[in-house]
Image (cartoon, rainbow, N blue to C red):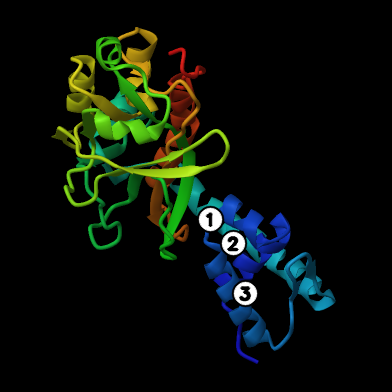
């Protein structure tokens, strides 16, 4: 019998505590595949079966219950050690290197940073802003802020969700008056489109219909840019139909400068606003303080931009 990995014991305790792999994945931000793999390794190291798995049932074996109690004690002791260290340096200090896409940095992070910096004067923030995927560990990023329709499954990174951002198809009232409001996505090929993708070879919008149907529409945009401000200005000027995040265009829709394109409830994939950062082990107090601050503030910003309307907007 090999000595068990203490991290695997922590994974096991998390799965038991949350009642299964799926719930543990949502709560811990760790992919099910990694949890299953590490617990299988723990069972191999201990030479016993800890969990009974089937398609319909999740159960902890008798010996698994004993191991779980010991794992809980281990985690409690580790937390006590962490708190002892934190008390020595209770005030967050030092540099935090943060990356973010342009729109998220401008619309969410910029208004929040002054409050965070006033609360934590010993923390220095380096904010890297670009519409590209920052490679967290090789580039030395402490916190990478992202909006993705599909989450990364990198086992070396921890994920923290902040909320979901809808994407909307919008156009100016003048454009819709000239060309008519759409009733179905198949009509998009007759309209001028404005795209946030700069890849000419992959210009496609995926829409989900009111009856659960999924429709992928190829488009030939008259404007392609990753700058949402440029796209929104073109849409307001009546140059075509734009796909924009709700956080970007909500105020313009409320003001009547833009309208939703479809009369029916055709939805686009939701973008998940989240942060990724290297493993929980050794997270510096300054990084933890920033993560907690953003988790407390960003969801309310997302919700304040939510449009509670359909084709009447």
- The secondary structure type at the circle numbered 3 is helix
Query: Mark 3 or mark 2, which is nearer the start of the sequence?
Result: 3
Distance of label 1 from label 3 (alpha carbons): 24 Å
Mark linked to residue 82: 1
Side of 296 relative to 224 (left or right): right
Rendering coords of residue 127 (x, y %)? 23, 39
Quadrant where the N terminus sits is bottom right
Whether tag 2 and tag 1 are in contact, CB under 8 A, the answer is yes
Residue for badge 2: 78
Q: Is residue 156 left or right of residue 13?
A: left
Q: Residues within 10 Å of mark 2 (few under 14, many from 20)?
A: few
Q: Which badge, 1 or 3, comes first in the chain's sequence?
A: 3
Q: Is residue 292 above or below residue 159?
A: above
| Residue to which mark 3 is pinned | 39
- Residue 98: % across, % down: 29, 44
Q: What residue is rendered at 46% in x and 12% in y?
A: 312
User: In this rendering, is residue 291 above or below 250?
Assistant: below
Disc 1 crowd rating (10 Å Cα; few below 14, some 14-19, many 20+) is: few
Q: Residue at 73% across / 85% down in the picture?
A: 48
Q: CA distance from mark 2 to mark 3?
A: 20 Å
Q: Is 161 positioned to the left or the right of 68 in the image?
A: left
Q: Position of residue 307 (x, y in %)?
A: 47, 19
């Amino acid at each position: 019998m090999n000595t068990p990995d203490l991290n695997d014991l922590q994974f096991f305790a998390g799965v038991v505590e949350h009642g299964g792999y799926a719930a543990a994945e949502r709560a811990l931000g760790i992919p099910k595949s990694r949890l299953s793999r590490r617990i299988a390794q723990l069972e191999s190291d201990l030479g016993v079966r800890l969990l009974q798995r089937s398609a319909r049932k999740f159960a902890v074996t008798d010996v698994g219950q004993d191991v779980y109690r010991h794992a809980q004690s281990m985690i409690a002791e580790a937390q006590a050690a962490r708190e002892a260290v934190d008390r020595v340096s209770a005030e967050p200090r030092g540099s935090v290197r943060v990356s973010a896409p342009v729109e998220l940095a401008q619309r969410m992070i910029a208004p929040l940073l002054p409050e965070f910096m006033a609360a934590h004067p010993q923390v220095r923030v380096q904010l890297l802003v670009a519409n590209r995927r920052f490679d967290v560990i090789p580039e030395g990023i402490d916190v990478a802020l992202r909006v993705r329709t599909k989450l990364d499954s990198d086992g070396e990174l921890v994920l923290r969700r902040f909320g979901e951002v809808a994407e909307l198809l919008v156009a100016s009232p003048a454009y819709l008056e000239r060309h008519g409001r759409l009733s179905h996505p198949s009509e998009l090929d007759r309209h001028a489109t404005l795209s946030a993708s700069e890849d000419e070879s992959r210009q496609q919008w995926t829409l989900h219909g009111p009856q659960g149907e999924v429709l992928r529409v190829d488009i030939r945009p008259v404007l392609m840019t990753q700058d949402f401000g440029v796209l929104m200005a073109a849409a307001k000027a009546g140059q075509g139909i734009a796909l924009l995040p709700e956080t970007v265009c909500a105020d313009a829709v409320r003001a009547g400068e833009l309208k939703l394109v479809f009369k029916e409830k055709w939805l686009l994939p939701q973008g998940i606003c989240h942060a990724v950062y290297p493993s929980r082990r050794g997270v510096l107090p300054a990084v933890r303080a920033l993560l907690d601050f953003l988790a407390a503030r960003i969801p309310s910003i997302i919700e304040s931009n939510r449009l509670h309307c359909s084709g009447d907007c």
